[in-house]
Amino acid sequence: MRYVVRLVFTLFFVFAPFFYLLFAQVQFCDGIKGEEIFVENFGQGVGIGDPLPLNSTSYTYTLNFPEENQYTIRSNSLPNTETLPDPDTWLWHILTEDISSSLGFDPGKMLLINATDNSNICYKSEVEGLCEYTNYEFSFWTAPLYNINSGLCIENGGIGVPVNLRFEVWNQDETQLISSAETGNIDNTSSIAFQQFGLSFTTGAGQTSVNIKILNNIQQIGCGNDFVLDEIKVQLCGGVSELTSVVYGTEEPTFCVDDPLRIITLKMESFDNLGYFIWQRSSDGVNWENIDEIIYPNSQGIFLLDIPEIFNTTYFRTVFASTEENLLDSERHCTWSTNTYIVYIISNTDSPLTFSNEISYCGDSVIPALAVIPVPNLMVNWYDSPVGGNLLYENSFNFVPSGPGVYYAGYTSEEFPCIGDIRTPITLIWEPGIMVSTNPDPIIICGDEGVVLDAVHPNSIYQWDPSSLGDEQTATVYEPGLYVVTIRDPQSACNEARTRTFIVEGFINPEINEIIHAGSDLVVTMVYEDEYEYSLDGVSWQFSNVFQNVGTGLFTIYVRDIIDCGSDYEEYLVLNLPQFFTPNGDGFNDTLKIDFIGELNLEVWIFDRYGKLLSILNSSNPEWDGTYNGINLVGTDYWFILFKDGVIFKSGHFSLKR
């Protein structure tokens, strides 16, 4: 079979795309992107990642929250477990996952840097497998971590020091700077926003590897220039071109298999200097074969290719490279290609092709849509049976069923009578998955008892943060803080993970501040205000902190939290000490007596105003008659010290009246 290639229009000029740029423009590839040669996403899954290879950064790795001049790799930016993440007081933004899911990838890990005031290397890596004389794009995502709501940085009116990064491409031995750019100042904000930065660079003769660097391009010393890096990539950047049809333009035609006009003329239009290219075809869009010879136009223009009869659905594209050697090198990724142009051939035995014949969804997640690969000029109806049955949905390549089951997609068309009645089955399976509550109520920790955190879902794989809690379904903690467990069910066909976040709040133990004897009442005051219960015997409790009509004696005052999480107690001696006595021999109040002096093991020392010890009252000498060595003392005030069990309990004075 012979294919005819025609050059319709060409502008000739000198082909010289190979040169070094010392300072590249900060821009992304504006052409066709080829293979991703290098990707650094810092690992998949949740939790804490391994440190970077040696010499990959100037910062020091830590498993914990990074301090100044440290970095960590993890799936979130949550603080240490001893600090609760209050967005208004926490220094950094709270990131529960990296940028990956926003870009359509599975969530993973990211590089978190607590930056210094120096121009340190944040990230560095060698990129191998490049092709000489080829253009590439070096890109990455970043975001400032400082949350201005915290108010902890005073620089620049509370906004803090902005993040500023410099990114560079060096040759293999780092003797020549190939390309470089700067992000400029990235201001801290009240809500985090990732930004992507990139630059283009071109390899030279024999150059198959480079070194990429991201550096802290600090412009101001101070607080706030911490940041996250993720999804660092080097990707081939090709020229700009488009593959269409002379007759149908961008529309991809559909023919019946017996249509006599199953021929087409392809048109490839180049908008810049392409280098070398070759036409290709495929029956499945995966495995390709060359059509005709390599073309060496080195120019812009329009190129046509006449395709004779097509008997099956066929994919077409044009593949480019900067050199003939690169175009023929199948071991490395040196090429880029145009868009794929498809010519569809249908027959009465065709049925829709699916992305997957079996789809699962998990737990309480949203029922996914069933889908078949779209074909121009055809539509699809959905049924509950391979033949006949009920029409469930019509004229759509997508269908959201009501629940699990087997559903059937069949082509329909008023234009193409060659469409048959064969339907494609798609099975939708529901898996129970991990049915757990993600946000249990806050838990109060009582004293030193500790609390048990339960992942709830049994027979699963558990990953606790912090990792020191182990890998079992339950973990016991003894300190307030934030604890997270990630749960995976190895028995489920669902590749999903659920997390439970536990907020453990500290408890302040009751502490008696003071007990006051006021008249016949005892009044208890506490160091901390809270809801307490009070008791004089540890059995009968009251909410009031006042005990009324208390007699004389030694009392133990008990106080406990209303949830019985903590308690305190204190002994208090209530004595009705006489304020005076009258030793005049009338038989009434003639001596100084202390109630229960023997029962309570009390001792009272009595002094005159000069500190002279006059008498000691105890169980064997319970009264004082106002004499000293048999001589009546004058009527005046005297002082006492009251001991209980040998310890000073109270002091004061009384009057002797004659």
Image (tube, rainbow, N blue to C red):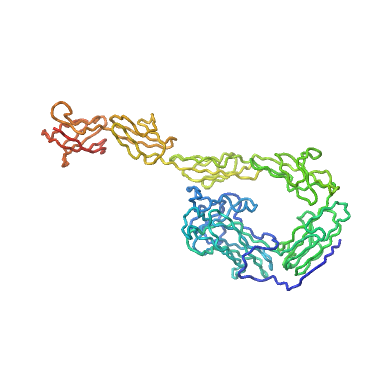
Counting labels gives 0
User: Which residue in the rendered view is the most extreme toward the bottom?
Assistant: 14
Front one among 617 and 182: 182
Q: In which quarter of the image is residue 281?
A: bottom right
Which quarter of the figure is the N terminus placed in?
bottom right
User: Which residue in the rendered view is the most extreme toward the left?
Assistant: 631
Q: Quadrant of residue 621?
A: top left
**Left or right side of 526 for 617:** left
Q: Where is residue 83 in the image (x, y as percent from the top left)?
A: 48, 48
**Left or right side of 359 for 313:** right
Q: Position of residue 12 (x, y in %)?
A: 76, 72
**Left or right side of 377 for 592:** left
Q: Position of residue 522 (x, y in %)?
A: 32, 33
Q: Position of residue 152 (x, y in %)?
A: 47, 55
User: Which residue in the rendered view is the most extreme toward the top?
Assistant: 587
Q: In this view, does 77 lie above or below 365?
A: below
**Left or right side of 273 for 210:** left
Q: In this view, does 155 lie above or below 422?
A: below
Which quarter of the figure is the C terminus placed in?
top left
Q: Is residue 580 above or below residue 242?
A: above
